[in-house]
Amino acid sequence: MSQLQDNFGRRFHYLRMSVTDVCNFKCTYCLPDGYRPDGKPKFLSLNEIENLVAAFSEVGTQKIRITGGEPSLRKDFTDIIRVVADTPNIKTVATTTNGYRLAKHAKEWYDAGLRRINVSVDSLDPKMFYQITGENKFDEVMRGIDAALEAGFERIKVNAVLLKGLNDKDLPKFLDWIKHTPIDLRFIELMETGLGHDYFQEHHLSGIDIKKQLEQQGWLFDLPRVDDGPAQNFSHGDYQGRIGLIMPYEKNFCASCNRLRVSAKGKLHLCLFTENGLDLRDLLQDASQRPELIERLHGQLEQKKETHFLHQGVTGVTQHLASIGG
């Protein structure tokens, strides 16, 4: 079966697969009131995940990122990693985590097949970290990053959402940190969601401002690599770490889109913002359903739009990013 491709010639080799929308943090830009379950959630089972990943592996998917909520809240998280890593054609297994369990489990997850990890750290000031996340776990998260470095992960990224009036003065601290630490630091521009209009108006900071500061300090733009996606990456001869900027409001941001998303309840999302998703779960019960599932994936790609329309003020149907894995 041919690789997934849309009507604009974009090929999709990267799947962001949510395994839960539960999170134990209360980040102000995502879940300011904490996680609120809608009844008793029934997230994808390990068997359903195995069937999903197997189908995607047959249509060109080479990289899978396990997301949440906080994915490590699942008791079978290590088993999920192993299932994904053991799937033929999947070359890269990654996850995004708030890092609170990383110190204890980094080696275990690495041994199961996890190779890349993104840790959310929105401030290097413990007080500001607490103000943004609602959790006093800064030291715990930083120990987790050290454990990941020690475990030998091939790439460790730290994600920080840019927030005017909160962490926008933290750039010098971040730069000092990555001078001697081999991680990729990624600044993510705040995106407006259905529940976050007022917050967006108060705290949105353009990534262009950070880009100008970096260029003034001698950071050089790196030519994109195949798996970089929409991030603009920069390096500096005096620093071990790199910096990536994710600026969804910049023109042509969607031109390099290479990813699809599946929610923790089995819905395919072609974009983070523009649609309600297509249910795949009825075709995840048995391996014999794989041909029909693959046919459905190809058919849905014909509906993918050229852009997310965020730059036109369209926030779409996504109420908060935890609901489909960010």
Image: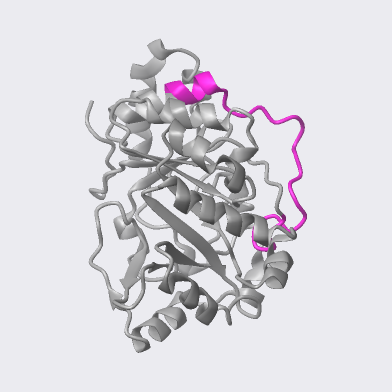
Residue 55, above or below 187:
above
Residue drawn where x is 61% and y is 48% of the image: 322
Residue 13 appears in the figure: yes
The image quadrant where one finds the N terminus is top left
Number of numbered discs present? 0
Residue 2: x and y, percent? 22, 30
Report if residue 271 is visible in the image: no
Examine the rendered structure and indicate whether residue 160 appears above or below residue 169: above
Q: Give the x, y percent position of residue 103.
A: 59, 48
Residue 114, image quadrant: top left
Q: Position of residue 38 (x, y in %)?
A: 75, 37
**Residue drawn at (63%, 41%), measured in percent from left and top?**
21
Residue 40 lies within the magenta run: yes
Which color mode does the image show?
one colour
Indicate the quadrant where residue 241 lies.
bottom left
Nearer to me, 41 or 67: 67
Where on the picture, by quarter, is residue 59? top left
Region in magenta:
26-51
In this rendering, would 133 be left or right of 216?
right
State yes or no: residue 127 in magenta.
no
Residue nearer the viewer, 115 or 159 = 115
- Residue 123: give x, y in percent of width and height: 61, 69
Eyeballing the image, is 253 above or below 101? below
Q: Is residue 252 left or right of residue 141?
A: left
